[in-house]
Image (tube, grey):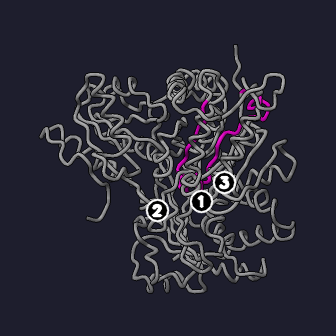
Amino acid sequence: METRVKGKLLAFRGDEAVAEAMRQINPDVVAAYPITPQTETVQAFSQFVANGEVDTEFIAVESEHAAMSACIGAAAAGGRAQTATSGPGLALMWEMLWVASGMRLPIVMPVVNRTLSAPINILCDHSDSMGARDAGWLQLYAESMQEAYDNTIQAVRIAEHPRVMLPIMSCLDGFILGHSFEPIEILPDEAVREFVGTYKPGYSLLDVDHPVTYGPIDFHGHFFEHKRQQVDGMESAPEVVLQVGREFGELTGRYYGLTEGYELEDADFVIVALGSVTGTIKTVVDDLRQQGQRVGLLRIRCFRPFPAQEIAQALGNKKAVAVLDRSLSFGAQAHQVYLEVVTALYTHGYAPKVVNYVYGIGGRDTLPHEVEQVYRELAEVDKTGVIQPVVRYLTVRE
Amino acid sequence: MSEKRQRLVEIRWHGRGGQGSVIASELLAEAAMDEGEYFQAFPDYGPERMGAPVRAYTRISTSPIRQHHQIIDPDAVAVLDMTLLGVVDVTEGLKDDGALIVNTSKSPAEIRQILKLDKARVYTVDASRIAMDTLGRNIPNTPMIGAIIKATGVVSREGVVRTIQERLGARLSKGMVEANVRAVERALAETQQG
């Protein structure tokens, strides 16, 4: 049966493509703080509201903290609530991120990844969302603008799945994808609306025939049990991410998983990364493969929950692995993605040589020859058996 | 399966804030859609101020463009503001057989002399003059697109006209859209090579 729909190829800026996905989803409520550090996503969406192109109730709030609070209220009332944020905006939401996940509210939030000051910098790195990795939100990271659009649509289905019921961040690299202007395939409105369906909340504050309480006091009694159930929701998510990615693939021809291997199977030397840099890495892999080098890429699309088994099995028998981090975990032994990958390997009984590269902090560009340098150094690690220094910094002045 | 690259044209734009470099990088890119090609345009953001040096980039390719990094060895460089020569290294990384296109009333030979440039092809066009004549304002971005087509043939004239009509047509009056098309046509006719 042919169920595939034909989209339309249109030129978009990344932030606006995400707004286009939100327009097609047509959420009940979007609450957003309308000025810096906000992105064009919310600006474009507010124009859809003003033009009557969506039915959404748009709440222009006084801060990002209030934006998340309003989304929480709307979602608890049984509505489909969304917002979008970036860098310091996400930082200001911090307290409410935990409330959203603790109340099991399936809020969808595109995060346009930017660094956190000081010194003052608004360019791309993953400091914002990596800092929020323990807040109980699912996190998808897009390689391309097309994927940022596609992920925003899939995120609705993943978050609202009865076995998940958790909020989700659909992350895309600020400026690099957010301000890039490219052709992307936009699905017909009705195809998106049919895919996301109607949200039927299990429990709604406005359902007065079935009264419920959201977010009451819960000290020694059952707080721990509630948190344990929240872990269950997260543990159910991989299966749902895969199922939704498969259905989306059947609809569009673009299939998505938890991770993506590129020239991975027979590779000796593998880079593990997430975000837009993986597109650049793929071009380098092609070039090096033409020279006969057995190099590959493992892209992590779903970072929360972390697909540990899949990653451990993909990397377990490699000669050397480099994990790229676009954020710093000050004082840690190494940085966020690396620590996850190494833990996955260890707990699944594998011990390949793994090094950590920090790259792209504060918008520093990552060029193909720098990716080649990483593959060269992996060959060196394999040859000498020495992994020190474990943490390396790509293109930084020392 | 790997997608192998066939043809990739990379263009770097140098201008000053307010001259429309970023819009131009996008208009040129989108014109490639007519030929069914892939494109990417992106700015190199610094502090966003009127008059500050701005860089933008355009990639056009027969294959999907997966890379997201700045262009370091461009096939063509467009300079929207002559006063940037000597302030910014506009020929940095320019391919030996690439094209340098400058908005100036000077000749290509004079530009070569100023930059002490003996490689690449040099094109000049008085895009500011054309912009004043057609648009009534010194916004040299659309005439520079005409000069780039002349110098590189990277997209078709028809693709550019269609893009200008669609993109600028959404924001500007019919008269201003037509004036932008005339600016492109004039630049195509007046661009000199040396």
Check if residue A244 falls in the magenta segment: no
Secondary structure under the numbered disc 2 in the rendered image: loop
Marker disc for residue B1 = none
Disc 2 residue crowd, few under 14, some 14–19, many 20+, Cα 10 Å:
many
Q: Are marks 1 and 3 in contact (CB under 8 Å)?
A: no
Magenta residues? Answer: A166-195
Which residue, given by chain and number where applicable, does mark 3 sit on?
A: B30
Q: In this image, A394 relative to B47: left or right?
A: left
Which residue, given by chain and number where applicable, does mark 1 sit on?
A: B153
User: Which residue is depicted at the point 69% across and 77% down?
Assistant: B139
Marker disc for residue B74 = 2
Secondary structure under the numbered disc 3 in the rendered image: helix
User: Which residue is depicted at the point 26% across and 42% down?
Assistant: A355
Q: Nearer the viewer, residue A136 or A325?
A: A136
Q: Are marks 1 and 2 in contact (CB under 8 Å)?
A: no
Quarter occupied by the N terminus of chain B? top left
